[in-house]
Amino acid sequence: MEKTVHIDTMKETDWQEVRQIYIHGIESRNATFDTTPLTKEEWDKKYIKDCRLVVREEEKVIGWAALIPISTKDAFYGVAELSIYIDTSSTGKGIGKKLIQALIEESEKRGFWMLQAGIFPENQASINLHKKFGFRKVGVRERIGKLDGVWRDVVLMERRSKVVGVD
């Protein structure tokens, strides 16, 4: 019997599951420059409160996506960086597609006209996922940061909304 999967707004009670998925991303060394997980307070401060989604299989959180503001300048209020993490046991099942589509729709309802993503070039699955939703490669930020003492590149991708900011 197939389990029910649905997208939902993140609740306070989801934090521990969201954090665990985030920790798996840290451990992969291909999802983030972070080497230690953020605290709940740090996470709340970093991510925009209106655009935090989780994907649930039955009641278990198996993925999350949220937006980070790219600037405090008023001119950039409609531009955000997308973060998406899928539990390692749920990759390859189309969960990322459902989640990114839902976050794009939610972001447009909230007035975001551009989403960007910074992805390690080794994370080809994430690059391919973003391309499926209209993200284009803007460039490569070469040797932008060190992870475990090794310089890493980041592929910068962006998606312009076709419904928000089209004036």
Image (spheres, helix red, strand yellow):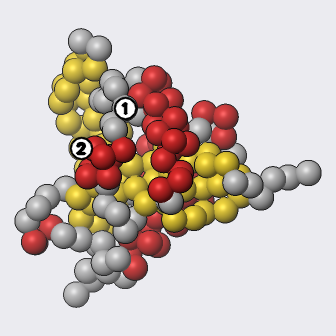
Residue 153 percent coordinates (x, y): 26, 29
Q: Is residue 14 left or right of residue 44?
A: right
Q: Is residue 82 above or below residue 32?
A: below
Residue 16 percent coordinates (x, y): 51, 42
Taking the view exactly as shown, the residue that stands out farthest to the right is 1
Residue wearing tag 2: 139
Gap between marks 2 and 1 measured at Cα? 28 Å
Residue wearing tag 1: 37
Quarter of image, res 99: bottom right
Q: Is residue 93 left or right of residue 70?
A: right
Neighbour tally class for label 2: few under 14, some 14-19, many 20 plus, Cα within 10 Å: few
Asked if labels 1 and 2 touch by Cβ distance under 8 angstroms, the answer is no
Q: Which mark is residue 113?
A: none
What amino acid is found at the position of numbered circle 2 in the picture?
Gly
Q: Is residue 109 above or below residue 151?
A: below
Residue 53 percent coordinates (x, y): 49, 60
* Residue at 32% across, 52% down: 44
* Residue at 24% across, 44% down: 139
Q: Is residue 78 above or below residue 126?
A: below
* Residue at 27% across, 50% down: 46
Circle 1 — which element? loop
* Residue at 30% across, 29% down: 33
Quarter of image, res 148: top left
Residue 130 percent coordinates (x, y): 45, 52
What amino acid is found at the position of numbered circle 1 in the picture?
Pro
Residue 77 visible? The answer is yes
Residue 124 visible? The answer is no
Neighbour tally class for label 1: few under 14, some 14-19, many 20 plus, Cα within 10 Å: some
